[in-house]
Image (cartoon, rainbow, N blue to C red):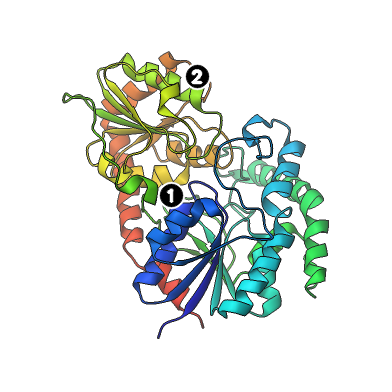
Amino acid sequence: MTHSYLFALTDGGGTVPPELGAARRLVERGHRVTVLGEDSMAPEVAAAGAAFTPWQAAPNRTDRSPDGTSYRDWEIRSPLAQARGMADHMLVGPAAGQALDVTAAVERERPDLVVTSFVALGAMLAAEAEGISFDVLLPNIYTMPAPGMPPMGMGLRPATGRPGRLRDQLVNGASTRLVDKYVLPRLNAVRDEYGLAPVDHTWDQVRRARRLLLLTSQEFDFPAELPANARYVGPVLDDPAWAVDTTWSAPPGDAPLVLVALSSTFQDQAACLQRIIDALGSLPVRGLVTTGPALSPAVLRAPSNVTVVASAPHRDVMRQAALVVTHGGHGTLIKAFAAGLPAVVLHHGRDQADNAIRVTTRGAGVAVRRTAPSSAVARAVRQVVEDPAYARAAEALGAAARRDAESGLLVTELERLTD
């Protein structure tokens, strides 16, 4: 039996390939899939074989480059400003428009299931108002408060003992109140417009999903008591469509190859990339740097043992590499581990400190400040390349990632429309 799916997605950069990977897998199974998304996602949607409908009432960024209206989160230092920015640009600011667009798409497509990005609160409430089940994709670790899970955003290890549990209780309580301050009244106002009862907390809207599908391996995340509707369904290891068919070549020689891949969205990463390149230039390694669509290779200087390109298929590069240097995005890390590669992480923000602490806790790499000088980056690269223990730990994580990626659990959960 075939089904009809409506994906309501936002362009989160690294979240796009795994989310559209889920859509592609449904298309390959013969299902009808329509993606409601931003114009920047149209080529990726076409490559997935799904129908594309652009957001109309909801915000629709046409590219990922910084401009005067972008959410410049890399510049924000205050927790208050961070919460307000997330509310305005990601969580509740777009919600009313998302609700309008999803309502229209539901009436037009009559889907059996709506599948949304984690931040698309308006899409969730519209599906709820239409009486259609919705699933939420989390192409990452579990990011909402949960017993046993350290608070997000700070790069914390799991709590131990009573002081640690008190830490989690206080920090999670404070962060929930902060998000609710800027999101909850506006979210409940939109819910009221659609005849829905108010929710007590912002994350209650997400938890109302039929399924919370975590596109990662449970072995990568920290253990915690998750809601009954949460499922670890394995990572989606697809490269973005814009990188799949690009040609690349590493510098000549047989020295270890180091892949450098920071964010595909702009996080003011040029200076950090240059320090990484300078570090590789001082070592007996070869480097391949992919800048992604957010940054031109022309802004970087490279020594003879480093090649800088806009894009390359990471899956192919990783077959030849010995190490990945990254900002700590989940997609790059999980692909590296699936290839048996350890990592040096220079986390920039967002969820990246939390990913980094999972890497270092498992011994699969080391973390370095994003502002670290090239000499410190060089020491970290040398350390990880020369100590085989890091590669062994990465391979252990990779075995779980490969197993889960091939398990079919993601499609099984999406196709199981009734319990």
User: Identity of the amino acid at label 1?
Assistant: Phe
Expressed as whole percent of the image width and height from the top left, the position of residue 215 reads 46, 58
Residue 195: x, y in percent?
80, 75
Q: CA distance from mark 2 to mark 1?
A: 26 Å
View extreme (left): residue: 254
> In the shown orientation, is residue 129 left or right of residue 74?
right
- Residue where numbered disc 2 is placed: 372
Give me the residue at 44% from left, 65% from top.
23
Q: Earlier in the sequence, mark 2 or mark 1?
A: 1
- Image side of residue 242 versus residue 171, left or right: left
Q: Are marks 2 and 1 in contact (CB under 8 Å)?
A: no
Mark 1 packing: few (<14 Cα in 10 Å), some, or many (20+)?
many
Query: Which quadrant of the structure image shows residue 122?
Result: bottom right
Amino acid type for the residue under numbered disc 2: Ala
Q: Which residue is mark 1?
A: 220
Residue 86 place in picture, x, y as percent: 69, 46
Q: Secondary structure at mark 2?
A: loop
Q: Is residue 139 visible?
A: no
Query: From the viewer's perspective, is 58 left or right of 309?
Result: right
* Of marks 2 and 1, the one in the foreground: 2
